[in-house]
Structures are given as C-alpha cells and as structure tokens.
Image: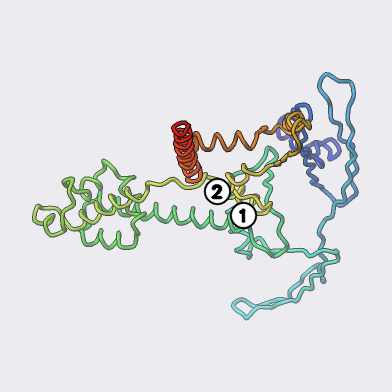
Amino acid sequence: MPLHLRRKLHPEMQPKGKVFEMLPPSGLLVPGQRVNVQVKFTPSEEKMYCRRLAMNISNSIHRVMLLVQGQGLEPQLEFTPSVVEFHPVLPFSPGDSVDVVVKNPCAFPIEFYSLEFDKQYLEEEMILRMVKGYDSQNILLLPPRHPGEKLPPELLEYYEEQKKIREDQAKHRGVEFAVQEGGATDEEIEGMLDTMDNQDLSMYLETNTGSTADERLTPKLDKKEEEGEEEVARGVSPLAVRLEKVKSTDSDSNVGVGDLDTNPVSKAIARHLGIDLSSDGQAARNRRGIAIILFGAPRSGKTNMAVTLAKYYGAACLTVDGVVVEAISSGNTAAGLQARELCARAAVEQAKHDAEELAGE
C-alpha cells in the first residue's frame, strides 16, 4: 500500500505491534531434550494485557496454549502552570523568567530531558545510531538501567574508540594533503606527526602505501637496521628513518591474536547476565557438566547402571582403570610421564626379581 494511503488508515485499522513475542519463535527438540523459551513483553500503552499464545506442533492436530498477562505503565508528568506566558520584554534587556513546577504522579522515578538543551541525550542518540544489533522492528535490547543512569560502559568505550579513529583519520588526511601539495617541509610534517602515536603512524603508512606521501616519507632501507646518522649520510632524512622504525615496530607488535571480536551490545548483555565471553571463560564453561561416580562390589550391576546413565545424560562412560591406562600410555602431561616412568621402572624391577628366582631354583 502506498505511503499516502497508509497514513489515511484509521487507528483501529493500522497494524499493531507485537505486545508478546516468543524467543526463539520455533525450534526442534530431540527425545528428552529441554529448552528455555523467553516471552518478551512490550506494551504500547498503560493498560492490562492478556493474551493466549498458541504453539503449533508439527504433524499434530494439538496445540499448546500459553496464557500471558502483563501490566503496561506509562510515565506521566504534571506541569504547573501548564501554559507559560511572559510579559512584554524590551530588546537587549536582561529578559524574564518564569518558574515551572514539574510533579511526578507515578509510583516510579521518571527521567525527562529537553531535546534542544540536553547534550547528554544527543550524545547517547549518536551512540545508539552507531551500534548494531537492531531487530526487524528496529528495537535494540540492552541491559535495564535506572532513570538518570548512562548507557552501558561497553557502548561508551566503543563510542570513544570510534571517535578516536575518526580523529586519527582526519589527521592522516591532513598530513597526506600537506605532503602531496609539496609545500610543507620535513620539519612541518614532523610537527604534524608529533601529535600521533606509533599506532597512528602505522595506520598512516598502511593507508598511504604506494602514494606520493609514501614515496616521499618511506625510505629504501637495507635489511639490517642502521643508525640515523648513517642514513642521513646516504641521503635519507631522519623523518624517513623514524617512520620506517615505527612501521617495523608496529609489525612486530601485532603478532598475537586477541579474544573473539564481539560487538558492544553483546558485551553489555553478557556482563549483565554474568557470562564471560573471553576464550578462558568459554573454555571453563565447556568444562562444566555433571559427573557421576559409581562404585560397589563385583557383579553388582555397576556397568549396566553406568551405561544407562550415560545414555540418559548424553555423557561419556569411563572407567578409572581405563583413564589411568590411557594417561600412562599416551598422556603428555607431567603426571602421565612420571607415571609411565614409574611403571617402566617397576616392570624392570619385577623382571629382575623373576630372573633371580629362576636362577635360585
């Protein structure tokens, strides 16, 4: 439907947003498996909501009905007076002021701001436009915050990083323009580069490889690192030596690989839920699980019980003897190597003892 016709629809005919939503909307369960389903409540006005969510089962005529209820609350403010009137004021005079009383009649705190004068709101809007993670309805889920609090620190750090990157790019464009114009001397260019750190210089070299700036600033050095005085004697400026050293230092420092790259929204949600997204945290989470130890007399049914429990929980069935033998035979840990050495020594001593007994007979 065209936009001009869509605007003419009556309010009752316009499509309403989803008040209750199930996450995930669908799924597959194997025999004995369980899964947690979240129900998101997003009220659009202050009233009591009551719905029945129908869940269909594939290849079945039965449906599971889930009754959900929720109370929507709408913040309200009372202004006294509701209309502000000023007396006539002469131009260039001190002006006039009127006091307005703002009252919160609700049972919960309310944060209010002015779009024209609140700089924090404008900055937060800019941050929210930069981050990713919006759904199909243009809604972004973040940890709840109390009125008056700022955005999650993960989003603020991401905004500061992006702002620094933009400032660095502006510096790089200024240096590149000065070099390509040819009017700036090495001293002037070096003054511009003094405001950059090693990372900024390396970014500049990477973005200007093969350009006029790179031909002017990057020297043709030998594989061995020479001193600045020797390079000047060969006709290379100290500024070029400095840039080459920064480039080599930066290439040597970027050897390791850090943690998995995650966006600030997922970091904030993980911190709120107490989830560690680092590689160590994921490894520790993978090591978690149920461990059942069965012991008893011979032929008491330990093996059958262990196999049944392993099938029920989807776990591995191990024996203590098997774990010890595998650790001794193919283990590479310090304990495994020491146990293997002790077993070999015991086997040699037992062989000597058997040989002595045979010789005595």
Q: Amino acid at mark 2?
A: Asp
Q: Is residue 67 above or below residue 83?
A: above
Colour scheme of this structure image? rainbow
Q: Is residue 38 above or below residue 170?
A: above
Q: Amino acid at mark 1?
A: Glu
- Quick check: can you spot residue 217? yes
SS for tag 1? helix
Q: Residues within 10 Å of mark 2 (few under 14, many from 20)?
A: few
For the point 89% across and 20% down, which residue is it? Answer: 61
How far from the left and from the top, in percent, is residue 192? 30, 60
Badge 2 is on which residue?
280
Q: Judge left or right: residue 228 versus residue 180.
A: left
How far from the left and from the top, in percent, is residue 127? 58, 53
Q: Is residue 1 above or below residue 131?
A: above
Between 75 and 343, the one nearer to me in the picture: 343
Q: Judge left or right: residue 146 versus residue 108.
A: left
Badge 1 is on which residue?
125
Between 150 and 308, the one nearer to me in the picture: 308
The part of the image, by quadrant, that contains residue 121 is bottom right
Task: Give the total number of marks visible in the rendering.
Answer: 2
SS for tag 2? helix
For the point 89% across and 45% down, which residue is it? Answer: 69
